[in-house]
Amino acid sequence: MGPYRAELLKKELGIFTFNDLLDLFPYRHLDRTKVNLIREITPDTEYIQVAGRITSVEVLGEGRSRRMVAELRDSSGVLELVWFQGISGMQKLLQAGSDYLVFGRTGFFQGNPQITHAEVELYEKEKPGGQAFLEPIYPATEKLKSKGMGGRQLGKFTLVLLGLLKEKDLPENLPDPVLIYPDPATGQSRKFLSRYEAYQQIHFPTHPDLFRQAVFRLKFEEFFIAQLRLGLIKSRRHRSSRGVVFAQVGKLFNQFYTQYLPFELTGAQKRVLKEIRRDTGSGRQMNRLLQGDVGSGKTIVALLAMLLAIDNGFQACLMAPTEILARQHYEGISRLLKEMPLEVRLLTGSSKSKQRKEVLAAAADGSLHILIGTHALLEESVKFHQLGLAIVDEQHRFGVAQRARLWEKAVIPPHVLVMTATPIPRTLAMTAYGDLDYSIMDELPPGRQPIATVHRFEDRRPQVMDFIRHEVAKGRQAYIIFPLIEESETMDYEYLERGYENLKAWFPEPKYWISRVDGRQKQAERDTNMQRFVTKDTQIMVATTVIEVGVNVPNATVMVIESAEKFGLSQLHQLRGRVGRGQEKSFCILLTSPRLNKEARDRLNTLCATNDGFKIAEKDLEIRGPGDIGGTRQSGMLNFKLANIVQDRDLLELAREMAERVLEKDPDLTMEENRGLKSFLQGQHGKTQWSKIS
Ligand code: ADP
Ligand code: MG
């Protein structure tokens, strides 16, 4: 290929090397021996190959609407071919009166079949039906197509390349023990196709079964290599990081545990505490992600971990994403520690300067034990005497870079525990967070009743309001949430305004009082309104999603979500998690307009069907795909070419197991059997590397 076309491939598809070209996989195969008739094109036809004579070629229009239009006739009909780009090249290639083989995506224009930017070549009756069983079609860009380098031509390059390659050019990278795998269907041992054969077959399959095996092998390879990398990063970090040691469980922890712990810990809470103790006692730095469902009781785990730090002579901090949450943590934790000889302080953006000075001094001289706050904790002026543990609540609100600043607050970096707001599906955790240590809390405290969730159309609002009255009469409280999306902010506020006015009509003072909390209010106003709801001075809380995370008002039993179709699944689950926190039966009502698309219906049905955050997270991943959901982590690690963490989850599990097995036996990949693997890893460039949560 000459320099001009090589340049195009670089620019358009990022193909620089032979390997890049081999890794451009076909998105479909076409039986190239098959030539259809123009008459067979229907509105459902996607791609088609036809052959016929060009009967006319004209260039029409000026400027942007300049286009070349050609007419192709076969024995059955006429097909229009249109180009907007690459016209001069096409003019040279297309001669009226000659026969062409034409391939492309069909469409209809004013009732007539048409192909825009078709791929064309001179038709030689003898040529089709070569040795290839199926012809690969590659994803090409409009630009490439217009330069005669469409999805078909790319296949020709690949075919030439594959013909040049010997087995040694595509050496096996999987170690022998990994090449044998248990067949998922039968459990019997099978052998993966060799790497060389897999590449031949995925591009130019000689049999459908071999094609499937090739795809299977290459998908496995992708997962396996990724899992191996993550495993290597993790084990290196474990061996090299240095952390302060929490050697003992001391007086404070024990005193709190025996005298003030308000409930028995769940099994999951105990297990996570054990994991934290093991990490913090090991001499290496803890970097742990704690995943727990809404309401699984992460706060108390955080508190106990902080006591552990203090028992060992260190300070601890807890960072929350919003002022309301930070305050709530501060109040809750202060209450729990009321009888203990401990200094707990709060620092947020709205702390008064005198108070702020005091807090900073206490943090710096070590008289403060626990500091709770918002982003304000990250500011340079916040210095600790000896910070041993930093906890970040509801992590998805913080960026990675922000959290990294926590590290600089001590000579030896403090242990870090990040608590997620909602569970992450296992497959995603394995890929996006596979290099981290993570704990899972998949158990709710006992006695919780599942929240009854229903979906209602807006015309049922009167009944919903009656229901709220009914609950309020029993002494309970209700949330009514309005959507607030950046793109439609102005309209959303109008909608909230109207909703609020309507509610005041349904729930008139002085019998009822309503709190309103939204992002446009001043902090103080928001806090007052929130506080009135917490103290039961108001029965109803109208809010935007500012209350989404963390807020804990156990007496609230009704959650109404307006325009629920506008929310994502995990957000809905978070919102619903604001009720069902006490002993009373709680309800969540999803109000929507009657017109819903399939995805919205899927979301709402999922939410009505289950209260399990882990199941919801799986479903969310299925509906949205991995691209959108990586939390704070960029999804660079999820960019698999062939494999898909949703559809190929079994294969991912297999790859992980195999990678673990390899690393267990040979953590630095120095054994002979892993030589091919090691040199393959060294040959891969430019892969994103992650190793820490913060
Ligand atoms: P989240 O994991 O969503 O942050 P919280 O820590 O706010 O959950 O806990 C939710 C509620 O459950 C709180 O009212 C808390 O006091 C209570 N709770 C936590 N652990 C237990 C337990 N083991 N038994 C009973 N109640 C618990
Ligand atoms: Mg919480």
Image (cartoon, rainbow, N blue to C red):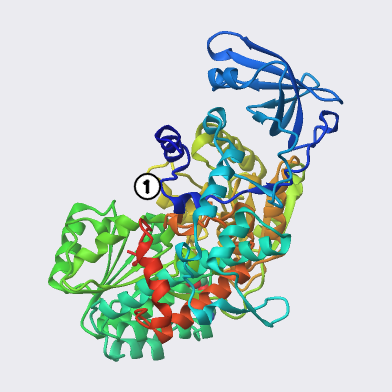
Residue at image x 49%, y 84%? 265
Report which quarter residue 636 is drawn in.
bottom left
Q: Nearer the viewer, residue 39 or 234?
A: 39
Kindly tell me whether residue 231 is visible in this rendering: no
How many marks on residues?
1
* Quadrant including the C terminus: bottom left
Q: Nearer the viewer, residue 90 or 292?
A: 90
x%, y% of residue 586?
Answer: 66, 65
Mark 1, residue position: 523
Report crowding for label 1: few under 14, some 14 to 19, many 20 or more residues within 10 A (C-alpha).
some
Left or right: where 185 falls relative to 5: right
x%, y% of residue 547?
Answer: 49, 54
Q: Give the amino acid at mark 1.
A: Gln
Residue at image x 37%, y 58%? 688
Taking 232 as reference, is 60 above or below it?
above
Left or right: where 511 falls relative to 485: right
Left or right: where 164 falls relative to 259: right
Q: Element type at marker 1?
A: helix
Q: Nearer the viewer, residue 182 or 86?
A: 86
Residue farthest to the front, as pictured = 126
x%, y% of residue 86?
Answer: 54, 22
Kindly tell me whether residue 386 is visible in this rendering: yes
Q: Is mark 1 within 8 Å of ligand 2?
A: no
x%, y% of residue 276?
Answer: 38, 81
